[in-house]
């Protein structure tokens, strides 16, 4: 029963990760499920919903359709809507019900493309994984299908930002701060995947000299772009002067040598523990170590890639195991939803994440790119 969370909340689901990654790009995204999942996503996990138009729908799958497998109704509904709305692409994402019935998302996407002439993608999300899984699938699909294969390397030093969604960065200006960091480092930002840019911007991503991966959701896309265009990638988020300087050097080294970079600090294990998404947490831990000399280890509580983590960091997603790992921590930095499983002896520092607590603590989510010093003044 260790897979059951008795106390802590779940992260935003993989289905919502697909929706978040594609939200601003002019496509039509359909969650294949009974009515309800769309309101959960738009109410709790999508801060752009009330300020920006996006074609996010739900199929309204009925019990009889699930049992009898009436796929033609879904296809007809999508084709009819696409003919009216003229989206740039169509995405169909899964939930638990089609997972149980064995729905073939790729086959349905091919039929929709054939009938509409619009590129369609099928994402076999299950609703049982975190947003990292779904957003990774969506951004990888963009890298494979929507980037101009003939894009020539730009004459000036340039970069893409990969893995940029509100589920990791909310809408507090962090996306603009990361772009400003690159500009100040001498890079022109070609595309931001996928906040504040269009599908047309993403199509030019192959002309960049380097890709900056700012969350685990962008790493699969970075690997595809590396294979297609030979573009190296650097993993990290600029936080604090010391770590930002390290990250800037890594970006320039990668652009010059073509080698991927994972800049981070490697102090011996200490008693500060950071819980959360892997790239964000390791970047924060490295920034704390370089700025303050205080060792911090990471417990990645979502899907993550081993290469983005350090030797002392761990990936743990089960509540019981996380709770055991925290018993000796002196300081814990995490979303407030984790506080009930933290020992009373530890000092708890709130670091809300949209993907974990949704809109509850949205006003308290800090922009660590430009306000890191304010945050560490609270920690130390």
Image: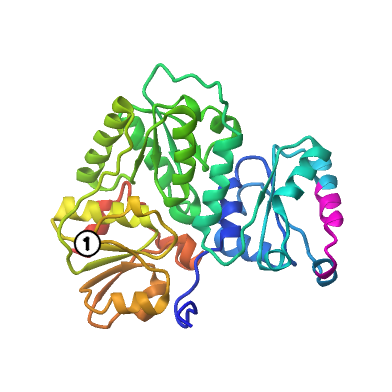
Observer able to see residue 245 = yes
Say above or below: 355 vs 208. below
For this view, does 313 lie left or right of residue 199? left
User: For mark 1, does the 10 Å Cα neighbourhood hold few (<14), some (14 to 19), or many (20 or more) residues?
Assistant: many
Please tell me which residue is depicted at 62% across the width and 47% down the height of the picture.
Answer: 52
Q: Nearer the viewer, residue 303 or 378?
A: 303
Residue most extreme to the top: 155
Give the x, y percent position of residue 349: 29, 68
**Figure quadrant of residue 302:** bottom left
Magenta residues?
67-78
- Specify the color scheme: rainbow
Give the x, y percent position of residue 1: 48, 83
Please tell me which residue is depicted at 78% across the width and 63% down the height of the picture.
Answer: 60
Give the x, y percent position of residue 75: 82, 51
Say above or below: 168 vs 189. below
- In what quadrant of the picture does the C terminus appear? bottom left
Q: Nearer the viewer, residue 114 or 102?
A: 102
Please tell me which residue is depicted at 71% across the width and 53% down the height of the picture.
Answer: 105
Q: In the rendered image, which residue does mark 1 sit on?
A: 296
**Number of numbered callouts drawn:** 1
Magenta region's main secondary structure? helix
Label 1 residue SS: strand
């Amino acid at each position: 029963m260790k897979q059951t969370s008795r106390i802590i909340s779940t992260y935003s689901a993989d289905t919502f990760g697909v929706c978040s990654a594609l939200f601003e790009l002019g496509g039509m995204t359909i969650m294949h499920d009974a009515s309800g999942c769309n309101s959960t996503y738009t109410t709790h996990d999508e801060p752009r919903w009330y300020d920006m138009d996006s074609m996010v729908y739900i199929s309204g799958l009925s019990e009889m359709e699930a049992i009898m497998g009436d796929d033609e109704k879904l296809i007809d509904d999508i084709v009819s809507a696409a003919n009216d709305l003229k989206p740039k692409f169509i995405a169909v994402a899964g939930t638990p019900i089609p997972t149980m019935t064995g729905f073939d998302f790729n086959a349905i996407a091919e039929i929709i493309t054939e009938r509409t002439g619009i590129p369609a993608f099928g994402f076999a999300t299950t609703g049982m994984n975190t947003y990292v899984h779904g957003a990774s699938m969506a951004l990888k699909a963009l890298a494979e299908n929507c980037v101009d294969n003939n894009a020539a390397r730009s004459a000036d030093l340039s970069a893409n930002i990969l893995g940029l969604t509100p589920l990791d960065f909310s809408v507090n200006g962090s996306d603009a701060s990361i772009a400003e960091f690159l500009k100040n480092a001498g890079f022109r930002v070609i595309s931001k995947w996928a906040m504040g840019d269009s599908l047309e911007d993403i199509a030019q991503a192959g002309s960049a000299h380097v890709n900056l991966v700012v969350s685990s959701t962008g790493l699969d896309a970075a690997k595809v772009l590396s294979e297609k265009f030979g573009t190296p990638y650097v993993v990290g988020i600029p936080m604090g002067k010391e770590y930002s300087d390290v990250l800037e050097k890594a970006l320039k080294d990668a652009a010059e040598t073509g080698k991927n970079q994972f800049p981070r600090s490697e102090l011996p294990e200490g008693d500060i523990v950071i819980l959360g998404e892997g790239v964000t947490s390791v970047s924060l831990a490295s920034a704390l170590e370089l700025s303050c000399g205080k060792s911090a280890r990471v417990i990645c509580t979502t899907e993550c890639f081993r290469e983005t983590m350090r030797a002392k960091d761990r990936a743990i997603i089960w509540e019981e195991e996380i709770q055991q790992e925290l018993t000796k921590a002196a300081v814990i930095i995490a979303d407030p939803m984790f506080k009930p499983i933290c020992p009373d002896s530890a000092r708890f520092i709130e670091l809300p994440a949209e993907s974990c607590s949704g809109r509850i603590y949205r006003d308290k989510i800090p922009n660590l790119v430009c306000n890191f010093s304010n945050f560490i003044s609270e920690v130390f």
